[in-house]
Image (cartoon, grey):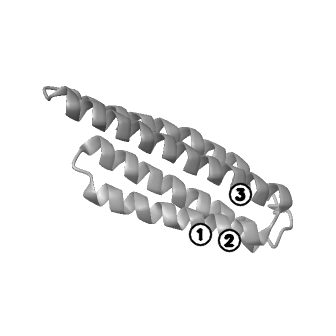
Amino acid sequence: MHHQTSPATTIQFIIGCILAFVTGLSSIISSCYGTGNADCVSNTFVSLLVVLLMICGYGLLIILGYLAQAQRSGRLALLLIGMEACAGVIFLFDAKQSPGLIDRAANLAAFALALWVAYIAFNLFRSGGARVVHARHSK
């Protein structure tokens, strides 16, 4: 999977959505445990909205990853790298600001996924749209 951005962004989508659900559920549980209903309801709404926005963001990345691979486009690969860089900065900032261990670990995992996808997109860009073939060395 040296320059296959489509499977990489699909993996990122699946893991990212799971992490978004886990952090959203953690936030909902922590706000609803032992507090009044008003805080619980408002935090639940905001947490669900954030999860929905994260799913939409990952959806855009998966579409861009598919198009970059299908068209073997250097420009789309660069756009994917830029979007992953923006997402990575957001994940790092959020990890730094996260009070909980679950949120921090999820953001660092999402950052690592963004780096991985950006690396694969860079390989696609560097190949100039050509297929990347690795020579096998016989023993």
The earlier-in-sequence mark between 3 and 1 is 3
Query: What residue is shown with label 1?
Result: 82
**Mark 3 or 1, closer to the camera:** 1
| Residue closer to the observer: 30 or 122 | 30
Q: Is residue 27 visible?
A: no
Residue at horizontal 38%, vertical 45%?
Answer: 106
In contact (CB < 8 Å): disc 3 and disc 2? no
Q: Kindly state the secondary structure of the residue where label 1 is placed.
A: helix
The kind of residue tagged 1 is: Gly
Cα–Cα gap, marks 3 and 2: 16 Å
Q: Is residue 128 visible?
A: yes
Q: Is residue 19 above or below residue 124?
A: above
Q: Is residue 120 above or below residue 20?
A: below
Residue at horizontal 46%, vertical 51%?
Answer: 110
User: In terms of image quadrants, where is residue 11?
Assistant: top right
Cα–Cα gap, marks 3 and 1: 19 Å
| Residue closer to the observer: 51 or 84 | 51
| Residue closer to the observer: 24 or 15 | 24
Query: What residue is shown with label 2?
Result: 78
Cα–Cα gap, marks 2 and 1: 6 Å
Q: Quick one: quadrant of the C terminus? A: bottom right
User: In terms of image quadrants, where is residue 22?
Assistant: top left
Direction front: furthest residue:
38
Q: Residues within 10 Å of mark 3 (few under 14, many from 20)?
A: some
In contact (CB < 8 Å): disc 2 and disc 1? yes
Residue at horizontal 21%, vertical 35%?
Answer: 39
The kind of residue tagged 2 is: Leu
Query: What residue is shown with label 3?
Result: 2
The kind of residue tagged 3 is: His
Q: Is residue 133 left or right of residue 13?
A: right
The earlier-in-sequence mark between 3 and 2 is 3
